Amino acid sequence: MNEQQTPATEGCSSSRRNFLTGAIATVAGVAVAPGISLISLAQARPADEAVSKDTRWGMLIDTSKCADGCTDCVTACAKENGWGIGSTDEQHSADTQRAQWIRKVDLRDKHTGYTHTLPMLCQHCENPPCVDVCPTGASFRRADGIVLVDKHICIGCRYCMMACPYKARSFVHEVLEDQKPYAPRGKGTVESCTFCVHRTDAGRTPACVEACAVGDHHAMLFGDLNDPRSELSQRLSKEASTQVRADLGLNVGVRYQGI
Amino acid sequence: MKNVAYLEIEGRSPGYYALLGLFALMIAIGLAAAFYMETHGHYVTGMNNQIVWGTPHVFAVFLIVAASGALNVASIGSVFGKSLYKPLGRLSGLLAIALLVGGLAVLVLDLGHPDRLIVAMTYYNFKSIFAWNIYLYIGFLGVVAVYLWMMMERRMNIYYTKAGLIAFVWRLLLTTGTGSIFGFIVAREPYDTALYAPMFIIMSFSFGLAIFILVLMAAYKGSHRELGNVMLYRLKNLLGVFIAAVLYFVLVYHLTKLYGTEHHASERFLLLDGGIYTQLFWIVQVLIGGLLPLAMLYHPHMGKSRAWIAVSAVLVIIGGLAQMYVIIIGGQAFPLEMFPGQEVTSSFFDGVVGQYAPSLPEVLLGLSGIGIALGVVTFAIKVLRFLPVSLADADVDPHAEKAAH
């Protein structure tokens, strides 16, 4: 806006206007700039544009960097999505009944004794068995590869939990009240990791990945498997990685190193 | 064979009303249990994120499997032309519908959202075997209802054989679908087998016939009608064949799984150190529900005793419920194998045997399915002509009368 073209405002000096304009611009710049840089990094699409299959979100987990006893990713997910310690709900449920969207699994080789640890979450399969078996279509896979549950048409039959090879899904066993607005959860429905879809859509990385980086572990890398220039694709093309239960041919979106 | 005369039962005795009252009570208690689970959430049940299908599924799948099997008696009469079985066709069809309704009610009331039944009816994922089953179940009710109409309406009798053939094919598809709910699950070692489809079919033959025999005996005793030995012995001999066939399928299933090293751990769990599941398998399913009734039915003296025939049928039902428990709950209890060769531990109970104990509401809901099935039959035989006036030897098969004694 041009200062000269702006009519003089009563009781508001030119210097004050200049100050306000500058201040607003500065505040806006500080607030938006990191967002812009993140958006450009993650190549976020505009909010009014549908997700497309040009993108396939995926993850690489380097178990050699995953610290024994560290649960930063789990804690971050729980707080972000409002389950476990991130919520005051599920107080009636037993440990075996409470939801866990992501968990740390400790492994020990039966023959050699070698131990390591890794986070286990929904693997966001290209051919998800949970989606195949869901009678109503509540379990679905977005064009960009994120596997979700439509809480409005989930009838709570739990067949997806029977079919998931990764034990990635949880059933909500009681009435919930302490939910996050962007992470819908409810009694009698099934839920699992969403790749923090609300963050991903806004061009941010999932909370677990961010927490792992903040903790300076950098064991988790999130990105677009379909973009050959993404760091994820670059590393996957140069380094060995494995899919858990590759024998099932599901072409998972989450790959591991060191297992 | 003579023309068969059918008549409603009188149904005025205190015993009849007591029976109807008992079934009504079972249904009411089951509904109350379902309401309790629905309002509180499933934390009040024994289920959890490891064992997601519990006792209600054991009852529901048992009843659904038995439903298709109960229709077999009618099929033998109409499809395979065994005239001896034709008088039993109406009861067979009625029992099939009643058992399916009972099983489906339990299944639906155990959903996380039974209030969304309309969603299940209006949203379909056609790749889901579960969705296929919704069509198979509803279709079965329709097909058998038409079959019954053809049987019971004299003008429609000419279509009776054709309707019987359609119903027979449909029931085979239905049980294939039910078995495949488990057979198609590739993720879990105890499942993932095409054998479950034919195995569930043969299980349905056995469970359905056992229930049919008991209902038939009770109905004829209660209504003071004659049920001759020719008919009863034929049915009990058939039950013996089905029990043996179920045992054969169980044997082939485990031999197949045992042959490859890959499944040794899951087989060891089910057959040797699976605790309650191992005990239920060997003691209740195989011994009490299989070998024992088999021996009793073919025993020269016990096999001729009505009391022992009834006991055998009861044992088959108990064994069948145990078999369902082992398949459904035992199959889930064995931990998923995600990392072969590794010992795994986690806060989400990876690598450990799933813990499950049936809760009272789940058992009560399951029993209400039996209440619904038997309640429907008890009521229906009073209002419509399902039961032949007599199944005495002379009425059923005059030529075989002498041979039976």
Image: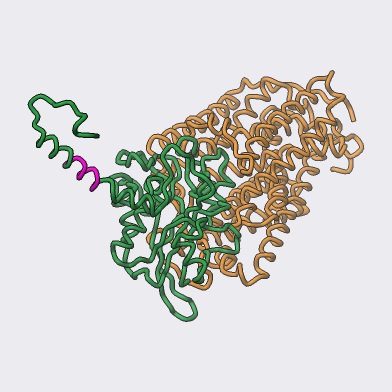
Say if B328 sits above or below A72 in the image: above
When asked about the image quadrant of residue A134, the answer is top right
For image coordinates 64% across by 53% down, the residue present is B183
Which of these two is toward me, A14 or A225? A14
Work out whether residue B307 can be spotted: no
Chain A drawn colour: green
Indicate yes or no whether the magenta region holds residue A24. Answer: yes
Q: Quadrant of the C terminus of chain B?
A: top right
Q: Which residues are magenta?
A: A23-30
Q: Residue placed at 52% from the left, 64% from the top? A: A244
Q: Residue at x 33, y 48 (%)?
A: A36
User: x, y (%) of residue B392?
Assistant: 81, 32
- Viewer-proximal residue, B15 or B103? B103
Q: Position of residue B346 (x, y in %)?
A: 40, 63
Magenta span: helix, strand or loop, mainly? helix
- Residue B343 coordinates in the image, percent (x, y): 46, 71
In the current view of this chain or complex, which residue is farthest to the front?
Answer: A4
Quarter-wise, where is residue A222 in the image? bottom left
Residue B10 shows in the view: yes
Q: Please indicate whether residue A119 sits to the left or right of residue B123 in the image.
A: left
Query: Where residue B112 sits in the image (x, y, percent)?
Result: 46, 39
- Answer left or right for B186 relative to B153: left
| Relative to B315, residue A14 above or below | above
Q: Which chain is orange?
A: B
- Taking depth in this image into account, of B106 and B25 the one nearest to the observer is B106
